[in-house]
Image (cartoon, rainbow, N blue to C red):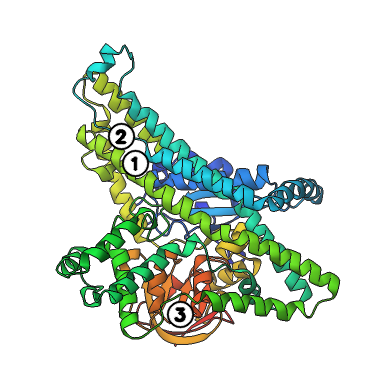
């Protein structure tokens, strides 16, 4: 048997936090470790997906873990047929989501899948622009369809037209039907999400592999700088904040913005100014769709969109206003970054033979063509569709409250999606019969108990990984998005065993060395606490944190790869960054001084 020092804990060795005993019953059985699957689970390597779920997930929120890894799996395993990787298996452990890359190790199977992949991927690469345009339309249709769903309170009696028009169908059934439609569309958009994403990562990995072979000394971040996109709708929400900040200064309204003020105070101050209404009109015109944008990743019901909490965009605007007043240029350096891309590429291309240069051009051209999708798909899926999804779930929760089934809307999230389906039928059937719903008493005690369990789970930090480290990590999503590489896993294990000498290691994604005080951010609500010059430490940063990057001097994250949002934004800002440390948020405390080296990938407490 593998010794404990050669591996991470196994699932069955993980103790529940005090007060969270029995947490397993809250989630669907297939998301939880089961005794009959222990041998297979113990033989694998699982890492925390804290990129998407930075906190323990409520039972209903676990729907994301189902939809994401179903969509990823069917595409990678059965659709485009990645040659050396299947899907990512998923489990919930102590409330946190863990995933396991599944490699294809049989050479004959790899060859069979390679033939399928070349045909299928080749079709997408040849028709990329057309297929991407069709993908965008599919997403717009899906979001529109979800927006059209209605969850109306149950009436005392059916509307008269149910009788006079001979409908023969209760309006209460709309609740059940629309719930199923909402869930179905949520799963559908996650299949769309992965339709082209693996191909985007795959194109980059081909270019990455070519560069590593042709230029053995080249740094990973240098390869990334030749490809990474700097334009497109992924940057649009933050660009809108910059535009509104410029408009405020142009109209002489700068003194109305203070990041410490509430939205009500800011809008009241603007309302007293002659051009205030003009600025407010520009702000309101921007909200749909650019503020349907989560402050994190939109996988948890208690994460907020900018539209849901206007403090978030207004704080960003206030930051940019103060920079403008200080004479700083707040524009993203798009032209400079694009020039740097071309300059770096030209320097390396000049070192190649004509035949190699042709291969270099083809691989680079394909990577640049598909790269925008790697960023832009998040706007459609994680932001626009998730914003609608959670809005509709809140509407449904209010129906339960109005009917006296739940005491408060938040009760809904303590049921998983299958339990909620049962509760919904209980609600409409009891209404139809004219008797109290049995679930009122059934769920009241259970929800109270689950509240206690969830509080205990969220108070505990997740382990970075479980199981036996792999000989080699081959999954493109694990490598590119999460930064889980063979080397990083070995570092995590070394640090778990206490062999780090206080130094934290990660992936260097943006060069530079900086010393400063740490600010550990565990929730987007804490971003306003950031002070100028501090080093931001988080499990992962979200794209919507861009304005906060204007005041920090460096970034460190627990997870994330060369193409994670933190890496891309830090390279754009020219800010040192180290990602995929595994332990930064648990080992560093706010106020500590550290030195981060964005070229070596080290974080050293001082």
Residue at the spot of label 2? 151
Q: In the displayed structure, would residue 11 be above or below residue 261? A: above
At mark 2, the secondary structure is loop
Q: Which of 484 and 480 is in front in this view?
A: 480
> Pointers 1 and 2 in contact (CB under 8 A)?
yes
**In this orientation, does residue 87 appear?**
no
Percent across and percent down for residue 493 are 57, 68
Query: Closer to the observer: label 3 or label 1?
Result: 1
At mark 1, the secondary structure is helix
Name the residue located 34 percent from the left edge and 41 percent from the top edge: 392
Percent across and percent down for residue 587 are 43, 74
Q: Which of 147 and 495 is in front in this view?
A: 147
Q: In the displayed structure, would residue 131 be above or below residue 498? A: above
Percent across and percent down for residue 26 are 39, 42
Residue at the spot of label 1? 392
Residue at the spot of label 3? 554
> Pointers 3 and 1 in contact (CB under 8 A)?
no
Q: Nearer the viewer, residue 238 or 172?
A: 238
Name the residue located 35 percent from the left edge and 64 percent from the top edge: 523
């Amino acid at each position: 048997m593998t010794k404990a020092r050669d591996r991470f804990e196994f699932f069955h060795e993980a103790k529940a936090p005090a007060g969270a005993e029995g947490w397993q019953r809250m989630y669907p059985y297939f998301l939880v470790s089961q005794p009959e699957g222990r041998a297979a689970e113990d033989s694998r390597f699982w890492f925390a997906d804290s990129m998407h779920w930075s906190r323990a997930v409520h039972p209903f929120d676990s729907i994301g873990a189902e939809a994401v890894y179903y969509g990823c799996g069917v595409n990678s395993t059965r659709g485009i047929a990645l040659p050396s990787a299947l899907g990512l298996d998923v489990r919930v452990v102590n409330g946190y989501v863990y995933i396991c890359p599944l490699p294809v190790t049989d050479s004959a199977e790899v060859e069979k899948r390679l033939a399928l992949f070349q045909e299928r991927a080749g079709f997408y690469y040849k028709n990329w622009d057309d297929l991407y345009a069709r993908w965008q339309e599919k997403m717009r249709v899906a979001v529109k369809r979800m927006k059209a769903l209605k969850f109306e309170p149950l009436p005392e009696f059916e509307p008269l037209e149910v009788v006079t028009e001979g409908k023969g169908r209760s309006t209460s059934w709309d609740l059940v039907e629309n719930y199923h439609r909402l869930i179905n569309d949520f799963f559908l958009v996650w299949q769309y999400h992965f339709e082209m994403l693996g191909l985007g990562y795959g194109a980059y990995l081909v270019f990455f592999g070519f560069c590593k072979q042709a230029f053995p000394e080249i740094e990973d971040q240098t390869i990334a700088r030749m490809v990474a996109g700097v334009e497109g709708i992924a940057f649009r929400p933050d660009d809108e904040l910059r535009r509104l900040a410029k408009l405020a200064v142009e109209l002489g309204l700068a003194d109305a913005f203070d990041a410490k003020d509430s939205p009500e105070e800011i809008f009241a101050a603007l309302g007293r100014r002659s051009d205030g209404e003009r600025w407010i009109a520009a702000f309101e015109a921007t909200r749909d769709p650019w503020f349907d944008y989560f402050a994190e990743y939109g996988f948890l019901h208690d994460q907020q969109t900018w539209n849901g909490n206007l403090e978030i965009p207004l704080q960003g605007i206030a930051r940019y206003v103060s920079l403008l007043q200080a004479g700083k240029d707040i524009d993203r350096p798009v032209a400079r970054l694009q020039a740097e891309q071309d300059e770096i590429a030209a320097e390396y291309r000049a070192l190649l033979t004509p035949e190699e240069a042709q291969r270099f051009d083809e691989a680079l051209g394909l990577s640049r063509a598909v790269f925008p999708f790697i960023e832009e798909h998040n706007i459609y899926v994680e932001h626009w569709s998730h914003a609608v999804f959670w809005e509709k779930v809140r509407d449904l929760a209010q129906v339960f409250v109005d009917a006296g089934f739940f005491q408060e809307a938040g009760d809904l999230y303590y049921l998983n999606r299958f339990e909620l389906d049962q509760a919904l039928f209980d609600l409409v059937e009891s209404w139809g019969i004219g008797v109290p719903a049995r679930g009122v008493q059934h769920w009241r005690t259970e929800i109270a108990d689950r509240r206690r369990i969830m509080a205990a789970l969220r108070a505990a930090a997740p382990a970075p990984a479980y199981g036996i480290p792999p000989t080699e990590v081959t999954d493109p999503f694990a490598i590119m998005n999460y930064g889980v590489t063979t080397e990083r896993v070995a570092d995590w294990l070394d640090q778990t065993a206490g062999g780090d000498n206080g130094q934290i290691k990660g992936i260097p994604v943006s060069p530079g060395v900086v010393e400063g005080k740490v600010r550990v951010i565990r929730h987007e609500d804490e971003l306003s606490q950031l002070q100028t010059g501090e080093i931001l430490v988080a499990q992962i940063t979200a794209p919507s944190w861009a304005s906060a990057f204007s005041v920090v001097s460096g970034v460190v994250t627990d997870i994330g790869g060369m193409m994670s949002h933190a890496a891309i934004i830090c390279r754009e800002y020219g800010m040192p960054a180290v990602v995929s440390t595994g332990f930064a948020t648990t080992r560093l405390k706010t106020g500590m001084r550290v030195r981060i080296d964005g070229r070596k990938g080290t974080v050293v407490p001082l």
